[in-house]
Image: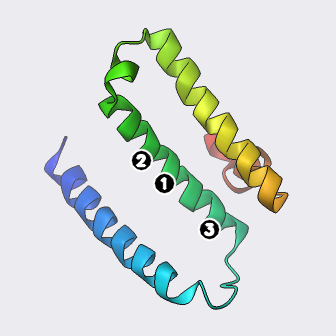
Amino acid sequence: MSKEFEQLKESYEKSLCVLADYSLEFFSDEKPNLKDETLLNGLLILQAILHDKMHECESFNKLSNEDKLEQATSLGLELRCLVLKYTDIDTAKLVNELYPDKV
């Protein structure tokens, strides 16, 4: 990884810690009125972290590339279903609306 990416990753991790602390302190008392885009960005971060952690899992690393892709796809679909069940927000539609050039 490049030095620039490492610095960005370090800054990103520090920012996540600040956001996590803030959310634990303030979001428990009142509705924070976050945008759907914020939900999607949080999910994309969560997916990236889970994907990273999947690669640390010994059983995952023993899988074929095809099975790894299947598991990663399954993870994304399960997150989509979870969000849809509890928020009525379809994250796939949200991605298409917010980031049409990246899909």
Q: Mark 3 points at which residue?
A: 38
Q: Could you say whether the residue bearing mark 3 is in a helix, strand or loop? A: helix
- Residue 4 lies, in percent from the top left, at 20, 54
Q: Mark 2 points at which residue?
A: 49
Closer to us: 47 or 86: 86
- Residue 30 lies, in percent from the top left, at 67, 90
- For the residues bearing labels 3 and 2, Cβ distance under 8 angstroms: no
Residue farthest to the right, as pictured: 88
Q: Residue at x 70, y 56 (%)?
A: 98
- For the residues bearing labels 1 and 2, Cβ distance under 8 angstroms: yes
Q: Which residue is drawn at 71% across and 66% down?
A: 36
Image quarter (top left, top right, bottom left or bottom right) of the N terminus: top left
Q: Identify residue type, mark 3.
A: Thr
Between marks 3 and 2 in the image, the one whose residue lies nearer the viewer: 2
Q: How crowded is mark 2: few (under 14 residues within 10 Å), some or many (20 or more)?
A: few
Q: Could you say whether the residue bearing mark 1 is in a helix, strand or loop? A: helix
Q: Mark 1 points at which residue?
A: 45
Q: Identify residue type, mark 2.
A: Ile
| In this view, 59 is above or below 42 | above
Q: Which residue is drawn at 53% across and 89% down?
A: 26
> In whole angstroms, how far apart are the C-alphas of marks 1 and 2?
6 Å
Looking at the image, how many numbered discs can be counted on the residues?
A: 3
| In this view, 62 is above or below 27 | above
Q: Identify residue type, mark 1.
A: Ile
Closer to us: 6 or 47: 47
Earlier along the polypeptide chain: callout 3 or callout 2?
3
Is 39 on the left-hand or right-hand side of 42? right
> In whole angstroms, how far apart are the C-alphas of marks 3 and 2?
17 Å
